[in-house]
Image: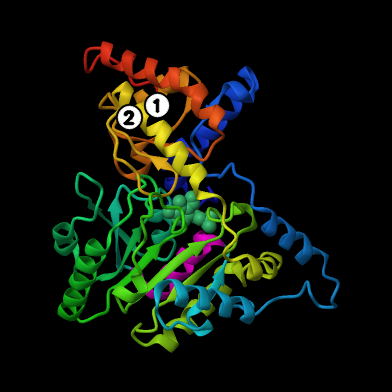
Amino acid sequence: MPVASRIAQFTEESYWVRRMFEEGSRLKKEHGAHNVFDFSLGNPDLDPVKAVKDSILEAAGVNTPGIHGYTPHAGLPELRAAVAEMIQKDEGIAVDENSIVMTAGATGALNVAIRTVVNPGDEVIILVPYFCEYPYYIDNHGGRAIKVPTLADFLPDLGAIDASITPRTAAILITSPNNPTGRVYNEQVIRGLADLLIYRSSQIGRPIVLIADEPYKVITFDGVRVPSILQAYPNSMTVSSFGKSHSIPGERLGYIAMSPGMNDAARTMDGLILSNRILGFVHAPALAQRAARRVLRDIIDVSVYQRRRDRFYQALSDFGYELIWPEGAFYFFPKTPLPDDATFVELLKKRLILTVPGTGYGMPGHFRIAYCVPDETIEGSLRGFEDAIDEARAVPSGKMARRM
Ligand code: PLP
């Protein structure tokens, strides 16, 4: 067959993603989209704010000759400078445009970052549960994903990270606010991680690069702030996206910000720019870049997600679901009341509720709910969530056949 064996294997392994889409579409066709409660995707339902929409329209309407040509591989200089200024203000760190590369979303940024710092056979530490695509991104560039457990509250387990570092460790990839848990790593955790990485980098004789994937950085609740990674650890890069913060994931715009303290900074930046080019992105979409500069701060109304978090969390806990109180992003990652997460997800599906088994995030026995959906979807689903947990509890353990 013409399909490479790794891709054939991954297609098989990630079968559940396709299956979810297919099942979701089938159920919506059969029962009507309004009667299906779809919590399976992190695709924000909120419309971008007016300033963002206006800026996209304006960018599309510009008639200057050459406006539709290529941009520099690193992105438009004025946009890179504006992003650098924003980071400088927010994080109090001296970055300029030479530390910024505009990318095709966070996905593009992650692939560019990994491509730049990982040799074939190198190891990249990811923390379980992880964003389901990470192992594939690492494999794309010949790296090996080393999956390290987190603590019961989903914070990084520094002892476990320490034990998993080897001379082949090129990078560690963290996500805060986290998908799928909603956990935000506090200052103390980040300081501890930075100290550990500084110590172990000197021990193994290579700088372990900290890649912080932060597309949800501004989606935090109750005044929680995401600590500055670039401040905390010199060999770091943050990856971000306008997808979730501005509700424009389809426009595919993100960026990498590199710490000015990065080892061999100029060559690393050259590597990031080259990777952006040769991975086939060439550069971030030009129209989105032109639209973004004046609306960097025009994010969606985060209080909407916070209100949903409060309401939904209360209802799920009242029904008996075990879950942490998320401080950011728009996900819950409760334990499944049955040991087999796929079976429980099927019980929910019987009630037209679509969620994702924790197995996809490296953590069976849980499931992910994405609450970036209208309030009516949340309200309409509550009875089904209650029924499903009641049914799961009524069945003696081990008696429920796996149906997925
Ligand atoms: N990283 C995390 C943790 C995500 O949740 C997502 C999207 O859901 C991405 C990266 C990809 O973001 P983008 O759409 O900007 O490529």
Up/down of 222 relative to 84, above or below:
above
Lateral position of residue 26 relative to residue 324, left or right: right
Q: Nearer the viewer, residue 46 or 310?
A: 310
Secondary-structure class at tag 2: helix
For the C terminus, the quadrant is top left
Lateral position of residue 121 relative to residue 195, left or right: right
* Residue position for label 2: 341
Q: Amino acid at mark 1?
A: Val
Q: Residue at x 18, y 61 (%)?
A: 164
Lateral position of residue 114 relative to residue 56, left or right: left
Q: Residues within 10 Å of mark 1 (few under 14, many from 20)?
A: many
Q: Residue at x 64, y 71 (%)?
A: 293
- Most extreme residue toward the front is 223
List x then y, in percent, for residue 317. Answer: 31, 28
- Residue 119 magenta-drawn? yes
Q: Amino acid at mark 2?
A: Asp
Q: Residues within 10 Å of mark 2 (few under 14, many from 20)?
A: many
Q: Is residue 23 visible?
A: no
Up/down of 193 relative to 149, above or below:
below
- Residue 364 magenta-drawn? no
**Quadrant of the rendered image containing residue 288:** bottom right
List x then y, in percent, for residue 223. Answer: 38, 54
* Residue position for label 1: 345
